Image (cartoon, coloured by chain):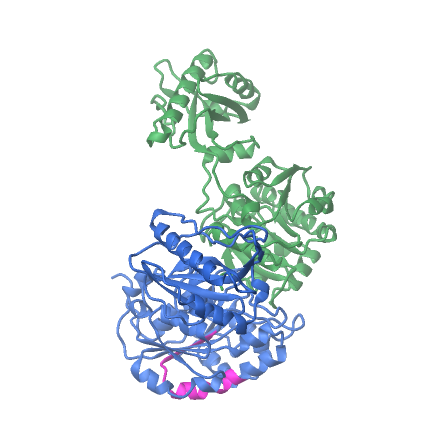
Chain colours: A green, B blue
Amino acid sequence: MRLDQIAALAQPNDTKVLLYVLDGLGGLPREPGGPTELEAANTPHLDELARAGTCGLHHPVAPGITPGSGPGHLALFGYDPLVYETGRGVLEALGIEFPLEPGDIAVRANFCTLDAAGNITDRRAGRIPTAEAAPLAEMLDEIWVEGAGCFVRHVKEHRFILVLRPEAATGPNVDDTDPGRTGEPPLRARPRDEESEPTAWLLDTWLEEARRRLADQPHANMTLLRGVSSRPRWPGFQDVFGMKSTAVAAYPMYRGVARLLGMDAHEVADGAASLVPDLRARFDANDFAFLHFKSPDKAGEDGDFDRKVAVLEEADSIIPDLMKAGPDVILVTGDHSTPATMMSHSWHPVPFLIHGGRAQNDEASSFGETACRSGAHGLIRGCELMPLATARAGRLAKFGA
Amino acid sequence: MRLDQIAALAQPNDTKVLLYVLDGLGGLPREPGGPTELEAANTPHLDELARAGTCGLHHPVAPGITPGSGPGHLALFGYDPLVYETGRGVLEALGIEFPLEPGDIAVRANFCTLDAAGNITDRRAGRIPTAEAAPLAEMLDEIWVEGAGCFVRHVKEHRFILVLRPEAATGPNVDDTDPGRTGEPPLRARPRDEESEPTAWLLDTWLEEARRRLADQPHANMTLLRGVSSRPRWPGFQDVFGMKSTAVAAYPMYRGVARLLGMDAHEVADGAASLVPDLRARFDANDFAFLHFKSPDKAGEDGDFDRKVAVLEEADSIIPDLMKAGPDVILVTGDHSTPATMMSHSWHPVPFLIHGGRAQNDEASSFGETACRSGAHGLIRGCELMPLATARAGRLAKFGA
């Protein structure tokens, strides 16, 4: 369903909707036939919500597709990630919570090394340590190019972002300057359409100056640009669903995606317990709250099955406090699966539960991958969750007469 | 799947397909964990069809979306209601079975009242009773505008429709003249594109004359226009599915939607039993019959759980007669859910059964929301039902070589 079709149905209500994201929730059994991390965890409160509510599984992007954190969260916010694609430059900028403005052009950049002939010898400058790279990034932040503000922010090791804020609107369709192999010179910034010619000129001008300033540096004497992209002009979350919204997350990436959609975002300390304080006040000022808990994904990425079990129990322990804040509808799920056995994000569907509103009967009497397969919501796409949650909150009018 | 893709596969056969729509079929339990209306009803014939056939659940529009009757039926006829959107004016015209022709512009209209300064004092003219409003509509039906036929038909109380039949093709993209609040004058008909400028001129000319003729009326001295829309130019049902088709319904809205797709439509008395006579003769002359039974929706809208149970038993009682008419494939479902506990249409998925053709094994041994969740057809979209039913009738050829 298109967002403009949803927006046409959104109707006011005084109901409150809570989205509680357990990052990397979905998992796999350690041994065939055994329990997944979520099934091994003792989660009495989530089980009770699953029993009284309605369950299902979702594909954040599509069957077989492993979601990144950006697309995974866009899906949970109701934005089909196959339609609402974010450029890599924009995602990297969101990841460090750079305050992108409309019209900004964001670029992922690497420090690299060139030989005397100007050919690339290392595309990542030997993964130059952060302690050395950060001062170089600060130096590049001082570059000034006619026609655009230029911002450089260090990310990690050889990685940084470059953001152009052009004085006149320009297009983002410019090829990478990274040729993808060594022994060749960096490419010029080549525009793919007429609107992006000024952007290519700005980037080339910036690159010339960066090369001049880095010339005498022993460990990184040039940079390569990739993923040139502009801050997307998407409908805001409130414009679509009619809910004033707030995001609470310890990590910048998640606040960044939330801000991209116009949500108010708050930084809190790591851990489930830090999501609880002020939740009631946040609901007083908003209709929708998104709470992000990172630990299950980290444990999964570390391949630590037992720690993932433990942090899922931690996630469960705050449910009574969340319910005390008075949400009318609570949606608990993950942005993707991160099975400890795979030590990475995976394409496996993610369990979800929706509690509150008009529940159908279903057989899911606990919260887990297998139980959710008997849930009444079935196996759906991630971007279909928000319409379900808002319907249950009485916030969607009838479609057609 | 697009309709042109289906049309390319439609192949002739002498099989007969019956679609039996129990309006508002889906429901919810009266108490958590209890039976829904359909599960509480004693429906031995539907249960037997479910047992021998194949079951599933469908979202008429999309998860979380509450369908109106128009979109719900378009979905059952195989037309994705998110793609085949009908304007509100057209839906209102269908609702009174006005015979719209291609090129017609249909508009929902209200009687309203203006003060001496020309500002709106009541957008619905105090919900003027039908007895007073109908003669006013007849008076407006006599208005003549250069360049278009003009038809006015009363609907109910303050509501009527205006249909323009322009001599030359014009666009339907004209804004409402209803400003949505009192204390302001009605708006002029503003076109949103160049093709719709003649339509706006025709509407403004008609409105001036309507104002003149209503000027001395005590209870309604003006009209407001909304939902300007044209009869859509969609592929006909027979062009898509290759089946000559007939519709049998007591209520005009359903005959109207059927006629919009080129079906032959017949009015019968209310009640399930009136769908039976002549069915065999209708099948002699057609490949596809759509039978509409309104009562479950009305009982649900009235919040009468027990009456909904009773009319579902009435729906069940005619199944042996329907089967005697010799359909090769019968599809029984609803156009949306109308839980008695909600007293309204709802977004909950709707049970369906398909009997005849090549049935898969499944575990659904009765016809109900929970049983259908274990049906082999799973949880699908409403517009996917017709391809399933026609496939089972041997009417769809292989896709690709």
Question: Which residue in the rendered view is the most extreme toward the front?
Answer: B216
Q: Residue B10: x and y, percent?
A: 28, 68
Q: Residue B366: x and y, percent?
A: 52, 79
**Image point 51% across, 62% down: which residue?**
B110
Q: Residue B186: x and y, percent?
A: 51, 53
Give the left or right position of residue B240, taking residue B49 as reference. left
Question: Which residue in the rendered view is the most extreme toward the top?
Answer: A216
- Say which quadrant the N terminus of chain B sits in: bottom left
Q: Is residue B329 visible?
A: yes
Instruction: In the rendered view, tell whether residue B330 sits above or below residue A232.
Output: below
The magenta segment: B314-333
**Does the magenta portion include B261?**
no
Give the left or right position of residue A366, taking residue B382 as reference. right
Give the left or right position of residue A257, taking residue B234 as reference. right
**Does the magenta portion include B320?**
yes
Give the left or right position of residue B15, taking residue A258 as reference. left
Q: Residue A228: x and y, percent?
A: 43, 31
**In which quadrant of the rendered view does residue B15 lie?**
bottom left
- Say which quadrant the C terminus of chain B sits in: bottom left
In front here: A181 or A383? A383
Instruction: In the rendered view, tell whether residue A344 sits above or below residue A190.
Output: below
Q: Is residue A337 visible?
A: no
In front here: B33 or B113? B113
In front here: A134 or B224? B224
